[in-house]
């Protein structure tokens, strides 16, 4: 099954551009109550994911950095601990399982690497749960 069925399109995804400030990211994550969001470059290509932990470690490991001056720190200056691997829109749902184990969402890109949306881990789990339920019902009706 093609993953486009599960796609949350870019227009419905909270993401940040790589030239955003740490303060902008903190405020956006707080407002939407997210722990991680995708990062895209000026051409719309997916370049990574920033997490609350990345922001916390930057704050901890940067002398004299506090919330008031986080508007001086650019996103590209924050080391990222996780590498959320993207998949191509042509991928199958089965290709997502290994990624979804360690990621809350899987970024989806086109052939040029342009970010087009995400697939949430909850969508993948629901898909496989429903498949298992359907198989169980089919097996029960065959007995």
Image (spheres, helix red, strand yellow):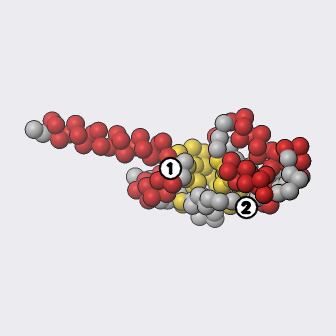
x and y percent of residue 108 in the render? 57, 55
Circles 2 and 1, Cβ within 8 Å, touching? The answer is no
Identify which residue is drawn at 73% across, 54% down.
57
* Residue at image coords 54%, 52%: 103
Q: Quadrant of residue 61?
A: bottom right
User: Where does the C terminus fall, quadrant-wise?
Assistant: top left
Single out the residue that lies furthest toward the left: 143
User: How far apart are the alpha carbons under marks 2 and 1?
Assistant: 31 Å
For marks 2 and 1 on the same chain, the one whose residue lies earlier in the sequence: 1
Residue drawn where x is 60% and y is 45% of the image: 9
Residue under circle 1? 4
In the picture shown, does residue 135 fall above or below 97?
above
Determine whether, in the image, residue 98 is placed left or right of residue 27.
left
Task: For mark 1, give the secondary structure.
Answer: helix
- Label 2 crowding class (10 Å Cα cut-off): few <14, some 14-19, many 20+? few
Viewer-nearest of discs 2 and 1: 2
Query: Mark number for residue 79?
Result: 2
Left or right, 112 with respect to 103, comes to right
Q: Above or below — where is 129 with respect to 47?
A: above
């Amino acid at each position: 099954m093609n993953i486009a069925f599960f796609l949350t399109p870019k227009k419905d995804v909270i993401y940040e551009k790589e030239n955003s400030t740490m303060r902008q990211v903190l405020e956006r994550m707080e407002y939407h109550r997210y722990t991680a969001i995708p990062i895209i470059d000026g051409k719309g290509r997916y370049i990574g994911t920033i997490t609350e932990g990345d922001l916390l470690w930057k704050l901890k490991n940067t002398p004299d950095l506090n919330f008031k001056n986080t508007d001086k720190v650019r996103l590209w200056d924050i080391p990222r601990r996780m590498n959320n691997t993207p998949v191509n829109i042509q991928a199958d749902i089965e290709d997502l399982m290994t990624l979804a184990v360690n990621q809350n969402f899987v970024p989806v890109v086109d052939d040029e690497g342009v970010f087009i949306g995400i697939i949430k881990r909850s969508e993948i789990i629901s898909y496989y749960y429903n498949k298992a339920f359907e198989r169980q019902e089919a097996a029960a009706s065959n007995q």
